[in-house]
Amino acid sequence: SFELTQPPSVSVSPGQTARITCSGDALPKKYAYWYQQKSGQAPVLVIYEDSKRPSGIPERFSGSSSGTMATLTISGAQVEDEADYYCYSTDSSVNNSVFGTGTKVTVL
Amino acid sequence: EVQLVQSGAEVKKPGESLKISCKASGYNFTSYWIAWVRQMPGKGLEWMGILYPGDSETRYSPAFQGQVTISADKSINTAYLQWSSLKASDTATYYCARPTTYSDYHYWGQGTLVTVSS
């Protein structure tokens, strides 16, 4: 089955760089997308098509992808970046999509 | 301004049916896909399926195929998610989301909490 695997948690101090990985067999052929979800809120798109940033998303958020791994980087993480982050992609062979397992980012 | 406004919280008993809604505004409803996403209490996001209101093409995650029905009423710019027989395990918050192309969900509804309990 189609899966995207993320580390359960990442912890950084304010101003440090947080890197969240997403591993999946379809990623060499399909784009990765990244969503931020703060407690009690709907998700927000922070990166699309591997590395593009929607308007309104701070420049400290960046994305990259190589082979079977995509990475979300928060450069100079802020306390307000504490949230759950989910990668997302589509299956290369069928009309199916999936979210990653999710990573809780703690900034303290 | 694009807006997705979902119907309110529901409390149902196992075996009951339910249809929740997602009313879209601020764009041409028939020109963009609309998806549904489940989030069980304390758990991650799960992609359920997606519908293109223009021609009603619908794609389901294998995990949800046959368990729910996704539909839309173009005349009132509203998408639906329905169950014919709820289970306690359907307890979750359900979000509708609209991409700009297919996977980039720039717009989200506020979520609908469905509680299924005897």
Image (tube, rainbow, N blue to C red):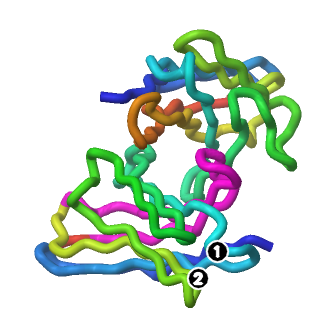
Q: Write down the residue under mark 2.
A: B77
Q: Is residue A48 magenta?
A: no
Of residue B27 and residue A22, the one placed in the foreground of this image is B27
Q: Is residue B118 visible?
A: no
- Vertical side of B33 occupied by A35: above or below: above
Which quadrant is the N terminus of chain A positioned in?
Answer: top left
Q: Residue furthest top?
A: A67
Q: Quadrant of residue B113?
A: bottom left
Q: Does residue A97 appear anywhere in the picture?
A: yes
The kind of secondary structure element at disc 2 is loop
**Chain under label 1?**
B
Residue lying at 63% horizontally and 52% vertically, measured from the top left: B105
Q: Residue at x 71, y 74 (%)?
A: B28
Instruction: Please state which amino acid type lies under the numbered disc 1.
Output: Phe
Neighbourhood count class around disc 2 (C-alpha, 10 Å): few under 14, some 14–19, many 20 upward: some
Highlighted magenta segment, given as a residue range: B89-115
Residue at the disc numbered 1: B29
Q: Is residue B2 above or below residue A39?
A: below
Q: Label 2 marks which chain's residue? A: B
- Characterize the local packing of mark 1: few (<14), some (14-19) or many (20 or more) Cα atoms within 10 angstroms: many
Compared with residue A24, is residue A95 higher up or lower down, i.e. above or below? below
Q: Are marks 2 and 1 in contact (CB under 8 Å)?
A: yes
